Image (cartoon, helix red, strand yellow):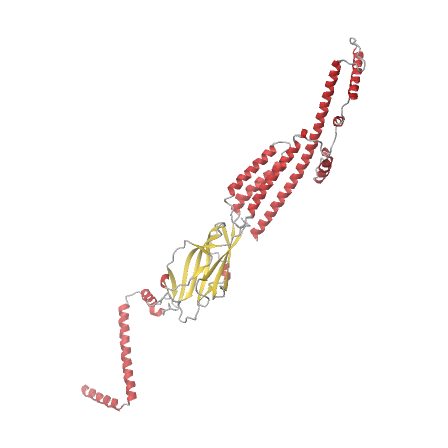
Amino acid sequence: MWNHCEEELRKTATLWIRAMPPSTLWAFLALLLFAFMFQSEAARKGNNRTLNSAKPALLQLSDYLLTHYRKGVRPVQDWRRTTNVAIDVMVYAILSVDEKNQVLTTYLWYRQHWIDEFLRWNPEDFDNITQMSIPTESIWVPDILINEFVDVGKSPDIPYVYIRYHGEVQNLKPIQVVTACSLDIYNFPFDVQNCSLTFTSWLHNIRDINISLWRQPELVKFDKSIFMNQGEWELLYVLSQFREFSVEGSDSYAEMKFYVVIRRRPLFYAVSLLLPSIFLMVMDIVGFYLPPDSGERVSFKITLLLGYSVFLIIVSDTLPATAIGTPLIGIYFVVCMALLVISLTETILIVRLVHKQDLQPHVPDWVKHLVLERATILLCIRDRKKFYPSRTPSSDISRHPENNDSTAKLNHYGCENLRKYERTAGARPLPAPPAQGESSPVVESILQEIAAIRQFLEKRDEFRDIAREWLQVGYVLDVLLFRVYLVAVLAYSITLGTLWSIWQYA
């Protein structure tokens, strides 16, 4: 019975096909062919799934993405579409600041990401994998460099990047950056440096590669989460700025510039440089209280000057040196050395005034008026009376030359005294003295000796008066120069201290 039904169906189908119009017949044949091909493809996929069921999903995805990948071509479907590269910088450490060569060495955490349209997949087809790492050398990477590079740093090699299913590529790596920086050392050791890091594509213009900031500028500016804050330099902030520029009318290029602002910690330099210099200057000021007529002050000042010279030799390697400028602290040391030399010179002049007075004439009247009278009032010296010029009777007498009359009077008075002594003593009568003008040679010799002694004593008193006058002038000038020196040192110190305080807390 089944054979009879099959025969009837075959006859019916034959009659139906013969009665079918040609166009309908061709459509029916095409439908049969499509059903056959669909069934064959389903069978092939079933066989492939059976064969690949033992292969890991990551390997399957890697083969799927990289088999026909071309890393030499910018990864866009439409060449008119711009590839946007977002970058981010986090400062990890300030390794060194070379003031002489104008070089800054920093250690950064650098991040960048972009969209690669050739690295996309459906996570459902690969065991719900949404991201994976692949070798950096296998894909296209933007040619973004730092314009200030002057040397290749010792950066670790990170050979992989992360890719996500929608085509985002994340390249995260630490880099040691050795860059050129215009360092201003005038405010050393209270200096603040501002160094720039300019990221730009070396070849591609802005139509091919555009650069943007990964995070918000405020987050980048005050991000110190990973910074090692125990070194000589302190990170203040990191500013970011985007700029589009062109070179000599050529295509425009995009650049992202980061300004790394750092400040030096001055405590070490203040202790090792400023305090010893301040102590030596204080000792130089205290040295003025030594008596100016003693030779100890000169030797003390010379010792201080030699000590300061040795100090400058020791600290010369600590001071930064550049060919375009000198730090203010270097000028401070030079001025301190000059002040010590001036102090020694002033001491030598004062000692010269108060010594060797026997070779000097009387103090001129105008010097007495200006120094012993006016200057004492100006300097508010309490005991001004002892500085006023005074004359002793012996000095007045010494200014009149001796003559024969005075000698004769001395002889006359001498004879009268001799007679009075004879009468009062009641001694044996002596021979009568000769008349005036007829004295014996012995008496004349004695009188000449007495006159010579008198002249010597008067001359000595005169030298003492000259020495006293010059000593008074020296004391007054010493007080005057000391106060001028003290005012100069204080004004200089206060000015520098104010400047350094402003720079430190600006």
Q: Indicate left or right for 134 with 487 as reference.
A: left
Q: Quadrant of residue 135?
A: bottom left
Identity of the residue drawn at 41% across and 61% down: 171
Identity of the residue drawn at 26% across and 76% down: 40
Identity of the residue drawn at 56% across and 46% down: 329
Q: Is residue 455 above or below residue 123?
A: above
Q: Indicate left or right for 102 with 4 as reference.
A: right
Question: On the rendered image, what quadrant is the N terminus found in?
Answer: bottom left
Exactly how many numbered labels are in the figure?
0
Residue 47 place in picture, x, y as percent: 26, 72
Residue 494 appears anywhere in the view = yes
Q: Return the residue nearer the eye: 433 or 310.
A: 433
Q: Is residue 376 above or below residue 461?
A: below
Q: Is residue 157 above or below residue 467?
A: below
Q: Quadrant of residue 382?
A: top right
Q: Indicate left or right for 229 with 498 as reference.
A: left
Residue 289 appears anywhere in the view = no
Residue 279 place in picture, x, y as percent: 57, 40
Residue 425 place in picture, x, y as percent: 78, 11
Q: Indicate left or right for 50 with 194 as reference.
A: left
Q: Return the residue nearer the eye: 142 or 125.
A: 142
Residue 146 place in picture, x, y as percent: 45, 59
